[in-house]
Amino acid sequence: MDLISKWSNMGPISEDYEKWGQIQRSMFKDKLFPESDDQSALIYLLYKEKEKYYDHIYLEKEFYFQGYWVDLIAVYDNTTERYLQMERKVARLRRRHAEKVSEQYAAFRKEFLKETGKWKRPFITHFTGCEPCSGNHNLKYDGETCWKGMVKALNFADNQILRNYGFLHSDLLDSSTVTEVPFDYPNP
């Protein structure tokens, strides 16, 4: 929490926002923008206070950490459809049993995803340029497209939890509708 508190104090709502931008730019000679930004601020903190933080850092390399939302929206749709197809393919694993042994179920799912290519779901979907609070979104896409993308990503993430309880959003643009997965699904 200490790290997050210090990190957030370098953001746009800080009184010292301009000062932090200058400090970061003086430290990182290739920094393009004069404002403080989240990535430069984090690197600055980790570098300046390495004695405090380095022993608590784990660099993850097994997962795709961050994905750009424009590239992921179609993948979310396809993955939801593929999940429904996979449920039918993995007929030997009954739904309630899968809830009890989620590691085994995840292994089946991992094998299925290998068939789809090397893509891994990212830990974070990065909505760069959407700016829903200010409305100053990137002109390459409109605000409605960003909003729909955020709804799809949220419902896709929600499905990760709902499936453990036998439910899912079959339409990623519809947050209010949840479909029950039958007790012995995918068995007939």
Image (tube, rainbow, N blue to C red):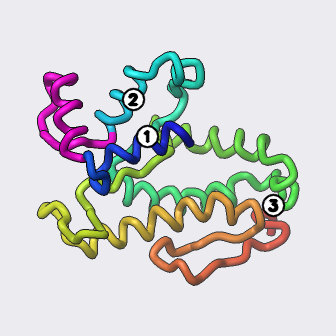
Q: Residue at x 61, y 63 (%)?
A: 159
Whether residue 153 sits left or right of residue 185 in the image: it is left
Q: Nearer the viewer, residue 128 or 16?
A: 16
Compared to residue 168, the image places residue 28 above or below, namely: above
Whether residue 180 sits left or right of residue 93 in the image: it is left
Whether residue 110 sits left or right of residue 173 in the image: it is right
Q: Could you say whether the residue bearing mark 1 is in a helix, strand or loop?
A: helix
Q: Nearer the viewer, mark 3 or mark 2?
A: 2
Q: Which residues are magenta?
A: 17-38
**Residue carrying label 1:** 6
Residue 51 image offset from top left, x and y in percent: 51, 16
**Does the magenta segment cover residue 34?**
yes
- The disc placed on residue 95 is 3
Q: Amino acid at mark 3?
A: Arg
Q: Could you say whether the residue bearing mark 2 is in a helix, strand or loop?
A: helix
Residue 2 image offset from top left, x and y in percent: 53, 39
Q: Are marks 1 and 2 in contact (CB under 8 Å)?
A: yes
Q: Amino acid at mark 1?
A: Lys
Task: State how far apart marks 1 and 3 are (Cα).
Answer: 45 Å
